[in-house]
């Protein structure tokens, strides 16, 4: 099977790769590019653990083909912190203990980042609806919602 | 398997028409990639239609709206003019999946996936939406209700692609609405659903009506008799009760884990009358 040559931008860096036509963006990120922050939970777009942002849209990378990233701008969890400086959402997730096993966390952080970019002052209900595409089996969601609320306050002040 | 990204609809149609093995059209992929992963389909050719000019745009014309086949449902919700003209269609499209899925899924894909429970389809049928089909022998425009023919099957021939969905320009005093029943608050598949589209005269009397029921038969139901009951009325209680009864009677649902036949019939009627009341209010009726 001939590979598809793809030129894309990931977290601001120009990236080129060869992938199979039926290979998902998630598999490309993890297995070809070593960006293992996005996780495979369900592989069918239900759990949100593989969330990334493509051209400003939050998507499940398991439901995007690697070939589709041609010419796009992809943002992953690896681009969220600046060096040792955590993003306010990452900091607040730590402070509020909004994670336990951590598998869902990169997806939640990316989804929350997208949510706050579009709606900097969400209500609790808007946060819960906005993050409904991300499943967490540990926290019961409440700590995650509190962390996002707190991060929103910090980010507005910044 | 081959992945191609043609730049014109003619090239896409040509590639699909000459494909020897199974071929699939990729827009948002929220159904296609799941079916590929599950082994339900193993395409030899994937035609990504997102690079084709015009397919990713919503255009407002003198006749109404043209929604390109690759426009994600999230973009429908962000289009103020469309939201104002066709709130029922937009609310139905925005009920599909999570934020992540909204960023990819399309109403054309929802239509062509041909699930009886597709959320946007009853709203589109009620709206009288049409689909522009491009194929080897040219283009034709068809009513959306003629696209799904059975669960997972459509009337599209080999090589045909829906390139856009058309919605009419709205007259004064018009409104539409869509409601579905699910056992949770979101992120679920409709147990049963209803879309209603009304236009009123200057006195608030229903002039035209279309009523569609979803997830209650192998394909979406356009219930003509229900529309006839609404026409000439001001949606008084008796009219709504008759509407509910007719819709319940027209259903041909199945018993499954989501709901029983009896439950689906009952709820179809309830949702149709509630959606009619909302559409009436949106049309300016009192």
Image: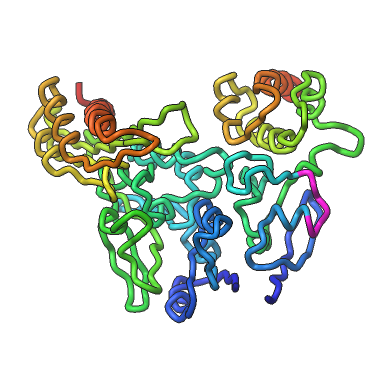
**Is residue A4 in view?**
yes
Q: Residue at x 18, y 35 (%)?
A: B247
Position in image of residue B95 (x %, y %): 44, 37
Position in image of residue B202 (x %, y %): 14, 30
Would you say B217 lies left or right of B232 here? right
Q: Nearer the viewer, residue B112 or A140?
A: A140
Q: Residue at x 56, y 38 (%)?
A: B99
Bounds of the magenta segment: A31-37
**Is B109 included in the stretch rendered in magenta?**
no
Identify the coloring.
rainbow
Could you say which quadrant of the image residue A6 lies in? bottom right
Q: In which quarter of the image is the N terminus of chain B?
A: bottom right
Would you say B33 lies left or right of A116 here? left
Could you say which quadrant of the image residue B193 lies in? top left
Above/below status of B12 relative to B115: below
Q: Residue furthest left?
A: B232
Would you say B234 lies left or right of A84 here? left
Q: Which residue is drawn at 49% across and 70% down?
A: B23
**Is residue B280 in view?**
no
């Amino acid at each position: 099977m001939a590979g598809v040559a793809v030129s894309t931008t990931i977290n601001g860096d120009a990236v080129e790769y060869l992938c199979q036509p039926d290979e998902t963006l998630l598999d490309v990120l993890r297995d070809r590019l070593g960006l293992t922050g996005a996780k495979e939970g369900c592989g069918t777009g239900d759990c949100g653990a593989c969330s990334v942002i493509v051209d400003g849209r939050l998507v499940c990378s398991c439901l995007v083909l690697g070939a589709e990233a041609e010419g796009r701008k992809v943002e992953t969890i690896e681009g969220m912190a600046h060096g040792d400086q955590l993003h306010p959402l990452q900091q607040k997730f730590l402070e509020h203990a909004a994670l336990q096993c951590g598998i869902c966390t990169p997806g939640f952080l990316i989804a929350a980042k997208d949510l706050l970019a579009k709606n900097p002052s969400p209500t609790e209900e808007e946060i819960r609806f906005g993050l409904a595409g991300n499943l967490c089996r540990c926290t019961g969601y409440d700590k995650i919602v509190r962390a996002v609320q707190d991060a929103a306050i910090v980010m507005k002040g910044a | 398997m081959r992945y191609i990204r043609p730049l014109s609809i003619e090239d896409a149609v040509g590639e699909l028409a000459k494909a020897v093995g199974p071929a699939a059209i990729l827009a948002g992929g929220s159904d296609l990639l799941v079916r590929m992963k599950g082994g339900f389909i193993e395409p030899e050719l994937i035609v990504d239609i997102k690079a084709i000019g015009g397919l990713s745009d919503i255009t407002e014309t003198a006749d109404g709206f043209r929604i390109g086949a690759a426009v994600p449902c999230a973009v429908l919700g962000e289009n103020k003019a469309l939201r104002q003209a066709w709130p029922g269609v937009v609310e139905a499209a925005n009920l599909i999946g999570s934020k992540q899925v909204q960023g990819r899924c399309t109403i054309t894909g929802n239509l062509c996936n041909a699930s009886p429970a597709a959320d946007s389809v009853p709203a589109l049928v009620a709206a009288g939406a049409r689909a522009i089909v491009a194929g080897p022998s040219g283009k034709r425009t068809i009513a959306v209700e003629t696209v799904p023919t059975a669960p997972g099957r459509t009337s599209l021939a080999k090589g045909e692609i829906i390139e856009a969905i058309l919605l009419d320009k709205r007259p004064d005093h018009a409104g539409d609405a869509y409601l579905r029943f699910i056992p949770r608050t979101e992120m679920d598949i409709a147990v049963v659903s209803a879309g209603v589209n009304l236009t009123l005269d200057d006195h608030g009397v229903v002039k035209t009506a279309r009523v569609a029921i979803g997830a209650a038969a192998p394909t979406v139901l356009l219930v003509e008799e229900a529309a006839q009951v609404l026409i000439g009325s001001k949606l008084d209680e008796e009219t709504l009760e008759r509407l509910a009864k007719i819709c319940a009677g027209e259903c041909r649902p199945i018993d499954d884990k989501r709901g029983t036949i009896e439950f689906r019939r009952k709820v179809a009627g309830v949702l149709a009358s509630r959606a009619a009341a909302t559409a009436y209010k949106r049309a300016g009726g009192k």
